[in-house]
Image (cartoon, helix red, strand yellow):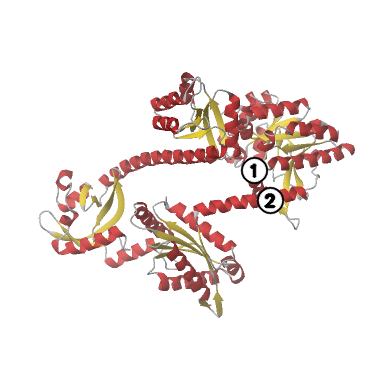
Amino acid sequence: MDSDKLLRLLTIFESSEEAEAYINILRKAGHIVRDMSVDNEEDMLTTLDDNPVDLILGKLNSPGLSARQAIDVINNSGRDIPFIAVIPAGSPENKQNEILKHGARDTIPENHAERLKHVIKRELSDLKDRRAHRRCEQMLHETEKRARALIDSSRDAIAYVHDGMHIYANNAYLNMFGYEDQDDIQGLPIMDMVSSEDHSTLKEFLRSYTKGNVMASTLDVHGQHVAGKQFKITMEFSPASMEGEACTQIIIRDQTMSKELEQKLSAMTQQDLLTGLYNRNFFIEQLDMLIARAIEGRTRGALLFITLDKYDELKETDGISTADMLLTEVAGMLQSRISEIGIIARYAGPVFVLLIDDVDTRKASNIAASLCKLIHEHICEIGEQSITTSASIGISLINETATHADECIKRAEKGCQQAQKDGGNRNHLYNPAIEDMAEHEQVSHWGQKIKQALKTNHFKLVFQPIVSLHGEPGAHYEVLVRMLDDENEEIAPREFIPAAEQMHMMNFIDRWVIMNTLMLLSQKQQAGEQTRFFVKLSASSLCDEEFLGWFRERLHASKIDPNNIVLEISEETALNYLKQAKQVINGLRELNCRTSLENFGVEQNTFQSLKHISVNYIKVHMDLIINLPQSMENQEKVKSIAEEASSRNIQTIAAFVEDANSLAVLWQCSVNFIQGHFLQQPGTELNYDFEEAH
C-alpha cells in the first residue's frame, strides 16, 4: 500500500449516501480512503480512542453532532486532527468566520468538489509536516541526551558556545583550562580561553566562520589557563544545538601529533583517492552546513549535479583504466578552473558535484552552462588517444525552503536526468512546482496514447501459469495485459497503468481484457480444452455501476462455462470500496463465476476482508513470498494464512515464486497453487505442461 496516499477519514453527515459522495471525490483524486462515520459525541470519542484518524469532514449543523461539538471533542481529546466543515452554499461570511474561529481548519461549500480536493491535499500535507516536526523534536531530545552523556565521558575537551559565550563544557574542558565546575564557565567569553595575542585571530576566524566564508573548521592558537600559563591548542569548530538552541561546538585538540601527520590524516578523510577532489562524505557535510544557513535566511546557494555523458560506453569500449584516467583528467581540469567558485567533489562514478554559495537562479544557470562548454571543449590526452566528452548538469537551488541534503541531491539528480533525456551537453534547473506540472502533462500524454491504443486494438494478452501443489488439477493461467507502441513493441504495465488509473481509464482496459479473454475461453471450450483464466479487476471497474450488467451480457453471449473465469480484486481495493466489492462479488457468484482476493496478507487485520466478502481464492502478497526461505516470520504468516483459508474452503495462491527453496517451503505450508518466473515468465503461448508439473 502507498502510505502517502492513505487517508483515514472520519465523516459526520446526516446520511451515509451524503458521506459516500464526498468519499468518492477523494478516491477519484487518488486517495486511499479508510472511512469511519459517527453521529454523536459518544461514538466520536470511542472512534478516536480506538482508531488512528487523519482528518474529520463534517457538516456545519449535523443534527446529532454539530461542527462546534465535534471540534470541542477533538480539543478535549488533545488530538491533532484537522476538521473541515461542509457549509451550505451561499453561507454568510460571518458564519464561516465563526466556525474557523472555533477551530475548524477550513470550510467547503456543498458540492464544491475541486475546492475539497485542494483543501484536503493542503491539510494532509500540513498534518504530515506537524507530525514529522514532533517526531524530529523527540528524536532531537533523545539525541541530545545521548550526546551529552558521550560528551561528559569524552577525554577530549569539548564546549558549546552561543554568541561567543560558553553555555556548556565537559570536565575535560574545565580541567584543561583550570576551572572547577560549570558555574565558573557559564556565560564566560570564548576569548578568555586564548591568549590576548591571539584575540584578533580568533575574532576574524569566528566572523568568517559565522558567515560561511572559511573552508577550514580548525584554528591553531595559544590556550590561556586560568592560572596564567599558555599552551598550544587546535580549536575545531562545528555547528551544533544545545537544548534546542543553535550554537557552535568547539573541540580542543592537543598538538602532540606532528602537523604533517595531522594534515595527512585530515586529507584522507576528505579526499577522493582516484581524482584528488573532495569526497562524497565531506561534500555532504558542507552541504548540510549550507542548508542550515539557508534555512535561517543567511544565504542561498545551488547544488550542481554533473554527469559525464556516455561514460559507460567509453568504459565498455576502452576499458576501466581509460575511463578512470578520463575522470582524473576532467577532475584536475575542474579543480584548476572552478575551485574558487565553490566546493567541487566526486560524488560517485562519473558524477561530480559542485556546491556554490551566495548565488541566484540566473547565476547558477550561467555557471552550469559555462561548465558544459568547458567540459565539452576540453581535450583529454590519454596515452595516444585524444578523448573529448560532454556533461549533463542538474541544478537544485538551496534556500529557506530546503529540507535536507538527500532531498537537494535528489532534485539535482532529477534535473541531470532531464538534461540527459534532452540530449546531454546541457543543464536543467529542477523546480519542484514546474516539474509537478510537467508530470501532470505526461499523464495527460499517456491518456491520449491509451485512448488511441483502445481505438486501434493496440493491446495484447500474455499469460503466466498457476500450478497446483495441493489444489485442483488442470490448466490455470493469470491473464496480463501489455500495450503496444506504433512499432508493435511492448510497453510495460508500469509505464501506462499509473496514467490509466489517474485518467480514470482502467475500466476501459479491463473491458478490453475481459472481452478478449472470453473470446479465447470460447475457442478453448469449442476445442474441448478446459482452461481457467484469472483476470484482474481494477477499482475503476469495481465502482462502475454499469460493469456488472455489461459483464453479464458478455458472459451469456460467449456461452462459456462461467466457472472457468476468475475475477481478481486486490485486498486493498476491496477494503477501500467495501460496499462496491460486496455488490460485485455477490453478483459474480450469482453468475457462477469465481472470485479471488490478491495482494492478501499485509493488512493489519489480515482476515477482516473475508468477514464481509466471500471469495474462492486468495493470492498471498509478494512481500510475504520474496525471501521466504530466509524469513521465519513470513513462513509462519504464510502457513497461518493457508490454514485459515482452508478452514473457510478458500484456496491459496503464492505468486512471485523465484526459486526452488521457496517452492519447498510453500509445499510445507500447504499452499494450494504457485505462480512466478521460476515456473515460467508471462508469454503469449498457452503451452505449459500442467500434467508434468503436477
Tell me if label 2 and label 1 are in contact, CB under 8 Å.
no
Image quadrant containing the N terminus: top right
- Camera-side residue: 661 or 192? 192
Please tell me how crowded label 2 is: few (under 14), some (14-19), or many (20+) other residues with Cα within 10 Å: few
Camera-near label (2 vs 1) is 2
Disc 2 is placed on an element classified as helix
Identify the amino acid type marked 1. Answer: Glu
**At x 17% / y 57%, what residue is drawn?**
191
Disc 1 is placed on an element classified as helix
**At x 73% / y 40%, what residue is drawn?**
510
> Extreme right residue here?
527
User: How far is the residue under mark 2 from the one under mark 1?
Assistant: 13 Å
| Residue at the spot of label 1 | 501
| Residue 362 location (% of width, % of height) | 44, 64
Q: Earlier in the sequence, mark 2 or mark 1?
A: 2
On screen, residue 174 versus residue 143, left or right, reads: left
| Residue at the spot of label 2 | 448
Q: Residue 560: in sight, yes or no?
A: no
> Extreme left residue here?
227
| Residue 401 location (% of width, % of height) | 41, 51
Identify the amino acid type marked 2. Answer: Gln
